[in-house]
Image (cartoon, rainbow, N blue to C red):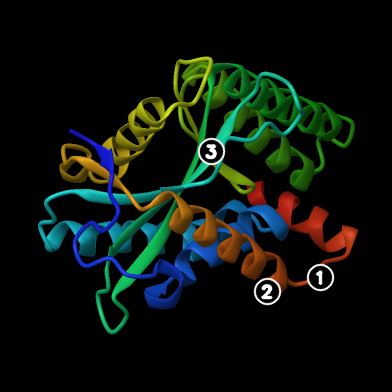
Amino acid sequence: MTAETKNPGNQRGLIQNCDATLSIEARKILRYESHCFSDCAELVWTPTQDFLSELAEKQPKYILCCKSKPFSPNHNEEECVHVDIIAPGFRTPDFQSAYLGMVVNTKQAVAIWTKYAKNFLEKATICTDALPEPKARKLYDGYAERLMKLLLSGPLAIIRENIGCYIPVETERLSRRTVERGIRKMLETLLPSLAKLPIRWAQKDEQEAFERFVETEAKRQAKSQTEEERQEAFRSDVE
C-alpha cells in the first residue's frame, strides 16, 4: 500500500540533506537549455540509469518519490506532473535525487505526440527542398525515421526527446494513484526490478519545497544561448 509518509526511512529535510545535482541538471538541460539528443543521453539519461542501478543494488524496500503540483501548460484540461526519485545517499549526503520525467494525462499526451509528429514532418519537408544535397538527405532521413517511430508507437508511448521525458497515463486527472502508474510504467522500461516495489511519497511540504529549489537552481544555472546556438543543437540531432 502506498501512502504519503511524514518520515519514511530516516528522512529529515530533503533540501538540507539531499544531493539534487541530477534533478537540477536534468531540468536545466531539458527545460532551460537546448541540446541535441546525444548530449541529453550523456548528461541526463545515462546518469539517471546509473542512479537507478545503484539504487537497485541497495535492494530498497520501497521507492521514495517527490512530485510537483499538477499544472497545465496551455491552461486547459491537459495536466502534467514532474517526478523525482529520492534515494539514500550513495556517498556522503543523506539523500540523492534524480529526475524521472513528466507524467502527463491523456489529453496532454496526445497534444505532445501531435506536436512532435508535426515538427518532424515539417523539418523533413523543408529538407526535401535542398535534396539531393548530402547533408539535406541525411537530415531528411533522420527526421523521417523519428517521425515513423513516433507514429508507430502511438500517443500513449513514453517519449524521450531533447526537450523532455513524457510519461503518458490513460486518465483525465492526475491523482496520486495515476501518477504512480506513470512511475511504474517508466521504471519498467529502465529497471523493471524497481517497478515492483511499493511507492512512498515525501511529506507534502517537503515535496513543494524540493520542487521550488530544483526549479530555481535549474533556471539560475542554465547558460544563456543565442537563437542560432539553439537551432544548431536541434539540427545536430540527426547529422
Dot 3, crowdedness within 10 Å: few (<14), some or many (≥20)?
many
Question: Label 3 belongs to which residue?
Answer: 81
Q: Earlier in the sequence, mark 2 or mark 3?
A: 3
Q: What residue type is disc 1 on?
A: Ser
CB-based contact (under 8 Å), mark 2 and mark 3: no
**Residue visible at 30% across and 44% down in the picture:** 190
Secondary structure category for the residue under label 1: loop
Measured along the vertical axis of the image, is residue 80 above or below residue 44? Answer: above
From what the image shows, is residue 154 above or below residue 119?
above
- Identify residue for label 1: 224
In this rendering, is residue 193 above or below 96?
above
Residue 238 or residue 179, whichever sits in front: 179
What residue type is disc 3 on? Val
Q: Nearer the viewer, residue 38 or 54?
A: 54
Residue 144 percent coordinates (x, y): 65, 28
Report the quarter where the N terminus lies: top left
| Number of numbered discs overlaid on the protein picture | 3
Horizontal and vertical percent for residue 67?
46, 46
